[in-house]
Image (cartoon, grey):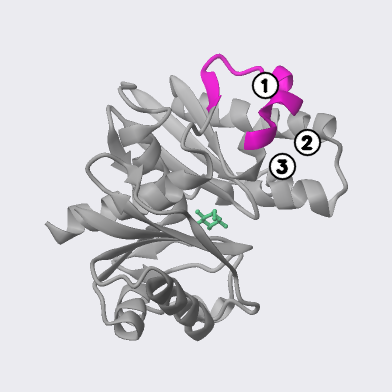
Amino acid sequence: MEVLGIDFGGSGIKGAIVDAETGALLTDRHRIVTPQPATPEMVAETIVQLVRHFAWEGPVGCGFPALINHGVAMSASNIDKSWIGVNAETLFSEYTGLPVFVVNDADAAGIGELRFGAGNGADGVVLLLTIGTGIGSALLNDGVLLPSTEFGHIEFKGDIAERYCSDAARVRDGMTWEKWGKKFNKYLMYMEKLFSPNMFIIGGGVSKKMELFQHQLKVKAKVVPASLRNQAGIIGAACYAADRSK
Ligand code: BGC
């Protein structure tokens, strides 16, 4: 099934047509700068622009950077607060006139990496962490996702983890990679203590910079970058929509 996969991020809203059976991108990725403020109406209009760009008429899957329950945004850590309580699926479907399925962005990346990327064929517990404006998480066991884990919001070092060691925290505090790597390692060690994964998959912007901090990571589990890179969310969102459309 062909699906328009969309990844709604803090800085860009990206989309591509995806073959959900193979994970292949059938078009180039198109990126539109995330409107500021990223209110429901502004984001919905951007989704419409993406649909028009691809002249798309089929199902749409959208990775969303907040806690999602049955299509409804339950949190808004890095997006406009007016999202809380809004049914993103209904809103996007109304704006586009197409069936839109909405899933947490990290869960989407988890689905993508698991089917077609670094987690493909991995058994046991795999924890994917997306490190960007916030920290998103996807916890998988033998290929099955436990959704909405939100480990970026776990209490850690007197605050929530994403304020301690997201990429935005690194930039905010002018941390060197050395300093940030040390902090990120502490967080990973804590995650390892709690969930004993066999593998950590690191997504988001920092996955392209792993050579700058990988030597500081002392966890026992393998730590690998998301192999679908910045396409994991788009591909995973498309798979999610294809599954829901069946
Ligand atoms: C949100 C998560 C999201 C993550 C990455 C966090 O602030 O709570 O739902 O997955 O950012 O975008």
Label drawn at residue 179: none
Label drawn at residue 157: 3
Q: What residue sits 43% from the left and 27% below the top?
A: 118
Residue 71 seen anywhere in this rendered image of the structure: yes
8 left or right of 234 in image: right
Residue 225 drawn at (x, y percent): 55, 30
Mark 3 element type: loop
Q: Which residues are magenta?
A: 208-224
User: Dot 1 corresponds to which residue?
Assistant: 217
Q: Is mark 2 within 8 Å of ligand 1?
A: no
152 left or right of 66 in image: right
Q: What residue sits 66% from the left and 39% below the top?
A: 206
Q: Amino acid at mark 2?
A: Trp
Whichever of callouts 1 and 2 sits on the residue coming sooner in the sequence is 2
Packing grade of label 1 (10 A; few <14, some 14-19, many >=20) is some
Residue 240 drawn at (x, y percent): 28, 53
| Distance of label 3 from label 2 (alpha carbons) | 14 Å
Residue 205 drawn at (x, y percent): 64, 44
Q: Which quarter of the figure has residue 115? A: top left
Mark 2 element type: helix
Packing grade of label 3 (10 A; few <14, some 14-19, many >=20) is few
5 left or right of 193 in image: left
Asked if the magenta segment contains residue 221, the reply would be yes
User: Dot 2 corresponds to which residue?
Assistant: 180
Residue 188 drawn at (x, y percent): 60, 30
Mark 1 element type: loop
Asked if the magenta segment contains residue 49, the reply would be no
Q: Residue farthest to the top?
A: 220
